[in-house]
Image: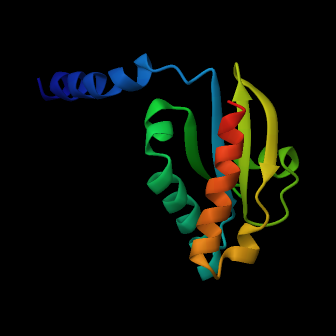
Amino acid sequence: MKKIFILSLLLILALPVFGQKPSPVRVIAYYFHGNFRCTTCHKLEQYSKEAIEQNFKNELSSGKLEFKAINVDEKANEHFVNDYQLYTKSLILVLIKDDKQVKYKNLDKIWEYVGDEKKFFEYVIKEIRDFLKDS
């Protein structure tokens, strides 16, 4: 009986996920990192996530924008290093149309602005807005 209850609960919780299709046009903001993460690397991810979550709530809830933190040191994620010519921790914006990548951009100035939260947020917000215009 307990197993049936747990299985039923899992199915009920999963229904919204299975029922949702990703938006045919969307932007994915990937923050790529490795196993070794210094204080600055953690701050890059934190600022990226906060800028997105605080300024794009509607886009996130509609599926038009996604934020994903990816560890490229994991075997399944190694391909991203070649896919986006990664050489350090990076925030990459990817425009997807009909499940195909149309373009991407490395927001490399995050390293320049990591010491200034306001400039960091302004930069990330502007770049995401530009990408969303194309979606």
The percent coordinates of residue 10 (x first, y second) are: 28, 28
The percent coordinates of residue 42 (x first, y second) are: 58, 72
Dividing the image into 4 quarters, which one contains the C terminus?
top right
Q: Quadrant of residue 73?
A: bottom right
- Horizontal side, residue 1 vs residue 108: left or right: left
At 71% from the left edge and 41% from the top edge, which residue is drawn?
A: 131
Q: Answer yes or no: is residue 76 visible.
A: no
Colour convention: rainbow
The percent coordinates of residue 101 (x first, y second) are: 78, 30
Q: Is residue 99 above or below residue 30?
A: above
- Horizontal side, residue 117 vs residue 60: left or right: right
Q: Is residue 123 above or below residue 113?
A: above
Q: Answer yes or no: is residue 99 visible.
A: yes
Q: Quadrant of residue 87?
A: bottom right
At 57% from the left edge and 23% from the top edge, which residue is drawn?
A: 23
- Horizontal side, residue 46 vs residue 127: left or right: left
State the residue in front, 8 or 18. Answer: 18
- Which residue occupies the extreme left position in the image? 1
The percent coordinates of residue 117 (x first, y second) are: 58, 75
State the residue in front, 3 or 80. Answer: 80
At 66% from the left edge and 76% from the top edge, which residue is drawn?
A: 114
Tally the numbered discs.
0
Q: Is residue 76 above or below residue 21?
A: below
Q: Is residue 14 above or below residue 104?
A: above
Dividing the image into 4 quarters, which one contains the N terminus?
top left
At 19% from the left edge and 27% from the top edge, which residue is drawn?
A: 3
State the residue in front, 131 or 106. Answer: 131
